[in-house]
Amino acid sequence: MAAWLAVLLAACASPPRAPADAAVPADVRTGRLALAVEDQPSQSFSAGFELRGRAEAGSLSLFNPLGGTVAVLRWQPGTAVLESPGHAPRQFASVDAMVQQATGAPVPVTALFDWLAGVNTPVPGWEADLSSVADGRLRAQRRSPPPQADLRLVLDR
C-alpha cells in the first residue's frame, strides 16, 4: 500500500481534477498538506488538497505538484470510497478505515473538521496545535499508540 501511494503521489501525468460531487455539501477548503508517519518513510507524503463537505459526508481530493488528481476519498454514513487514476475504486466501512489504509496512520477526520474551525476537539493520542488556524495553518501530532504521525495543513487564502 505504501509503495502504491508513493507512486500515485509522484505521478506527473494524471487526469484533471475530479468534478465536484453534487451529493457533497459545498463547504470547500484548499491548500497543501503533509503527513509524516514515523518509521514509515514510504507513507510520508505531501500533496495539494481540496476538502469538501463535513465530517459526516464529504470528500478529500489529493493533487500532485502539477495539479493532477492523485486520489479522491469520498465518504458518507456507512460507506467510504477511495478512487485513484488507473485503479478500481476501493470501498471501506468508514472514513477512518479508508484514511488509515491510504495513509498508514489513523488520521481523525471528524476532529480535523473541528480543528480547522478552531475547535480543539480532543482525540486520544493526538495533540492539535490550533494557535495558527486563524492564519490558515494547522498542525496535529499523534503521540500514541504507534505509529507516531505529524500532520500539517496550510490553507489557501
Image: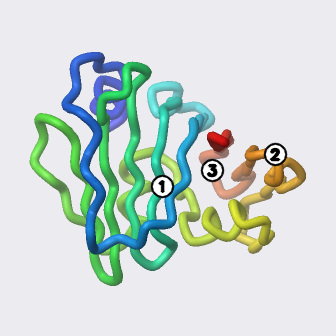
Instruction: Give the image's coloring scheme.
Output: rainbow
Please state, as top left, top right, bottom left or bottom right, where the C terminus lies in the image.
Answer: top right
Q: Is residue 96 left or right of residue 120?
A: left
Name the residue: 31% across, 49% down.
72
| Residue sitting nearer the eye, 69 or 95 | 69
Q: Amino acid at mark 2?
A: Asp
Residue designated by label 1: 51
Residue 93: name its quadrant. bottom left
Nearer to us of marks 3 and 2 is 2
Residue designated by label 3: 146
Name the residue: 52% across, 26% down.
41
Mark carried by residue 90: none
Classed neighbour count for the residue bearing mark 3: other residues with Cα under 10 Å, few (<14), some (14–19), many (≥20): few
Q: Amino acid at mark 3?
A: Pro
Secondary structure of the residue carrying tag 2 is helix
Name the residue: 53% across, 58% down.
106
Please state, as top left, top right, bottom left or bottom right, where the N terminus lies in the image.
Answer: top left
Q: Amino acid at mark 1?
A: Leu
Q: Position of residue 73 (x, y in %)?
A: 33, 55
- From where the camera sits, is residue 153 visible? no
Q: What whole-number distance in Å separates the C-alpha atoms at marks 3 and 2? A: 30 Å
Classed neighbour count for the residue bearing mark 1: other residues with Cα under 10 Å, few (<14), some (14–19), many (≥20): many
Q: What whole-number distance in Å separates the C-alpha atoms at marks 3 and 1? A: 26 Å
| Residue sitting nearer the eye, 72 or 4 | 72
Q: Is residue 1 above or below residue 144?
A: above
Q: Is residue 89 left or right of residue 110?
A: left
